Image (cartoon, grey):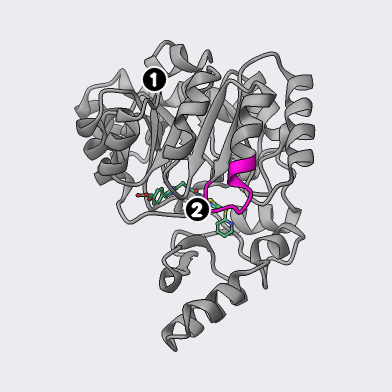
Amino acid sequence: MRTRITELLGIQYPVVQGAMARIADGNLAGAVSAAGGLGIIACGGASPEWIREQVARARELTGNPIGINVMLMDPRAAEVAELVCELGVEVVTTGAGSPANYMGMWKEAGVKVVPVVASSALAARMERLGADAVVAEGTEAGGHIGELTTMALIPAVTAAVSIPVIGAGGIVDGRGMLAAFALGAEGVQCGTRFLTVEECGVHEAWKEKVLKAKDSDTIVTGRGTGHPVRGLKNKFARECRKMEMAAQSGEELEGMYAGSLARAVAGDVENGSVMAGQVAALVTERGCAADVIAEMVREAEALAGRSLDEVAAMNAGRERA
Ligand code: TUI
């Protein structure tokens, strides 16, 4: 394929693997990039040593471009931001804040800068500061989320900026990819779909929970702290919601979330924060990164080549392209 995103990032397909904190490592990112998408190593909660190792691992797997994500709420964000320049990765994405303070440094180092945004206002601010593209991530996504749905956010962001927009949040297959493109996107980012692929090292219990999830099985916790997080329903999420209803102080609530992701990563999917997007319900297979990307692009293109009458007739027969 050829879009502004494939040209900008030097990749074959405009499919980006979302950075999943403590999960998206060099093995997953390397596999996605080797398959022609853009793999991203998640640095939320990670040490500089771990990040170096994972970049080296991804480089062993592929000569294609790779990305690093800087989680801006991380206490070590500034240190990771500098590491991005030193390690020579081709792309940096950011989440959970504004990367304004680091943009100059990254641009000077020749890194392509792609902030994740949840509003058109932040998208426009990022464009003014020199961002090469943005990811517009709707509230259907897993992990730390904004308010707007993908359906409302992508057209708002594409109207606000001239740089290319990558749609994210609730995209899991070719139908979602085409929908994002119909709304104005030139690429997509998917996280949840990559959780169950064979190259993803997340605990088997987490994969099973995603594979079994139904459409109403995600829940948002942490609204009371100003840092809402979407994950799969479990004992931890129920207790968080109970605490939030009882209007505990922000500090008490923060204490409840401390270490919750680490517990889930270790396999305790009842007492940990099992982050996943709403489309966990649509993830029913494992597969490998290359098949996920190829099938998504194939389905989107097969669907795009049809008239609306034909699409409606397929929909009536519950047929997929
Ligand atoms: O960053 C994400 N998703 C994440 S980060 C993460 S790590 C974590 N670990 C433990 C507890 C909580 C989180 C898990 N998931 N997505 C990108 C994203 N960024 N979504 C929404 C935003 C966002 C929201 C508000 C970006 C900027 C913003 O406002 C900044 C401003 O200055 O206006």
Residue 268 percent coordinates (x, y): 73, 67
Residue at 39 percent across and 14 percent down: it is 3
Residue 247 percent coordinates (x, y): 42, 86
Q: Amino acid at mark 1?
A: Glu
Check disc 1 and report the residue beneath it: 301
Q: How many marks?
A: 2
Q: Which residues are magenta?
A: 72-79
Residue at 41 percent across and 69 percent down: it is 223
Q: Quadrant of the image for the C terminus?
A: top left
* Label 2 or label 1, whichever comes before in sequence order: 2
- Note whether 91 is above or below 155 in the view shown: above
Tell which of 210 and 221 is nearer to you. Answer: 221
Does residue 223 belong to the magenta stretch?
Answer: no
Check disc 2 and report the residue beneath it: 142
Crowd band around label 2 with a 10 angstrom C-alpha radius: few (<14), some (14–19), many (20+): many
Query: CB at mark 2 closer than 8 A to ligand 1?
Result: yes
